[in-house]
Image: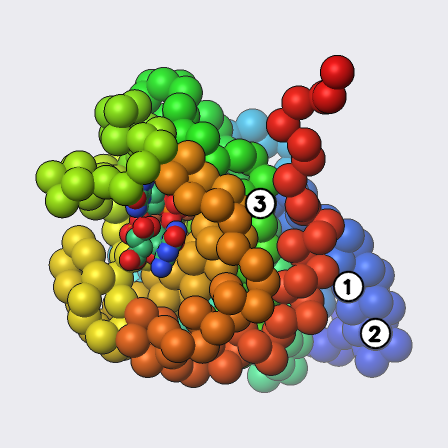
Amino acid sequence: MNNRQPFSSDIPAEDLLKIIFEYASKLAHENDLDTLHILMAEMGKKLTMADRCTLWIADPHERKLWTKVAHGIDRIEIPLSSGLVGSSYQSGETIIIHDAYTDSRFNPDIDKKSGYLTKSILCIPIRNADKEIIGVYQAVNKQSYPSIFSEKDITYLSLAATYTGQSIEKAILYSELVESQKEVIYTMGSIGESRSAETGNHVKRVAKYSYIIARGAGLSEEEASLIELASPMHDIGKVSIPDAILNKPGKLTNEEFAVMKQHTLTGYSIFKNSKRKILQAAAVIAKTHHEKWNGKGYPEGLSGEEIPLYGRIVAIADVFDALATERPYKKAWPLEEILNLINQEKGKHFDPQLVDVFFDQLPKILEIRSLYAEKPERMSG
Ligand code: C2E
Ligand code: SIN
Ligand code: SIN
Ligand code: SIN
Ligand code: FE
Ligand code: FE
């Protein structure tokens, strides 16, 4: 037996601190979801003196809870409603059981496959910063006498669960980023190279301006980063606009402008079926970045807060940058005239509160503008 404290069922306070400090620093530097997953399971196991601890993560689209075990290659999956873990996930309740086999909710399938004998169980739901349940911590077989989980174990594992929820969500966002990049590359590849005369720095600037406005409007770091990552794709629908319209050196006719307006819906349809948060945000932004606060925009003529916030944010960033840049159909505007226009369009084209945010954040925006200024198109001589 490896019971170090045979007559105490809870971990000593100094060990508790050691474990928390040890894992807090490891977790803080880890972005890889699988590694985080394993570290957190280890931490839960030590905190509760359990023989095993499993961190189950929900995949609501697939209606599954999955986990990853050390050295294991594959994920283990169970249905969202299966067993005590599923019960805790769906009810949001902490569950303590002394003998799993006496509880009708227990699902013995995993024991049957592995030959393991589950006795005591503790299940605690894990919530993200928005208090949504994103998974369940499950500790199995308390390794001390009495061999049942206690109120202290609940406290310790709940603490770990709070921390875990935040780290896991960050890691999921990061792994989504990696997946999204692959998807974007694939998508771009399938629809051909963009022919728009807009340069790479245009999309970078729009992304940074959007981030600054989003933060200034009080959005979280995570959400502002999401907008930053998604906004570069706002004009991706322009790839299907005929060259004669896209790069026309003069003003568009009404018919030509009607075709041009389609870039919003084309962009939306490229991303709308993706499950990825970033690409869902890209779909919304592509569709709504030309809506106007007064309802006179397109494609749907939405007004005010009917327009998704992401679209309202990117609208300001996009126009600010479009006006500042030379296009086949227009010269670059001087800064003062651009700022006048944005001010005039407050409550007309643009969300008035976001125009205030834009002016509050102007020093940062101008910093980005000079940092990502266009380089001369070609070398002279
Ligand atoms: P874009 O060039 O990226 O411009 C984005 C938005 O910035 C425009 O959306 C508009 O709200 C604003 N904007 C750009 N230039 C001007 C300007 O000279 N004056 C004013 N008041 N606002 C400006 P919009 O109007 O919905 O246009 C969407 C896209 O359609 C533009 O994207 C551009 O690709 C194209 N487009 C619009 N008008 C013309 C045109 O007269 N000629 C050509 N060749 N393309 C045009
Ligand atoms: C399982 O992990 O699916 C078996 C234990 C339980 O019923 O929660
Ligand atoms: C244009 O780009 O010429 C149209 C600007 C506008 O009226 O929104
Ligand atoms: C909000 O609408 O959520 C506040 C930001 C704004 O639109 O000004
Ligand atoms: Fe656009
Ligand atoms: Fe644009």
Marks 2 and 3 sit apart, C-alpha to C-alpha, by 44 Å
Q: Is residue 168 left or right of residue 16?
A: left
Determine if the C-beta at disc 2 is less than 8 A from ligand 2. no
Q: Give the percent coordinates (x, y) of residue 364.
A: 68, 67
Q: Nearer the viewer, mark 1 or mark 2?
A: 1
- Picture residue at 43% right of the left edge, 82% below the top: 353
Residue type at numbered disc 1: Ala
Determine if the C-beta at disc 1 is less than 8 A from ligand 2. no
Which image quadrant: the C terminus? Answer: top right
> How many neighbours does mark 1 have within 10 angstroms: few (below 14), some (14-19), or many (20 or more)?
some
Q: Give the percent coordinates (x, y) of residue 134.
A: 43, 62
Please name the residue that numbered disc 3 is placed on: 204
Question: As rendered, which of 358 and 325 lies closer to the eye?
Answer: 325
Residue 24 is labelled as 1
| Callout 3–callout 1 Cβ contact below 8 Å | no
Q: Give the percent coordinates (x, y) of residue 161.
A: 58, 69
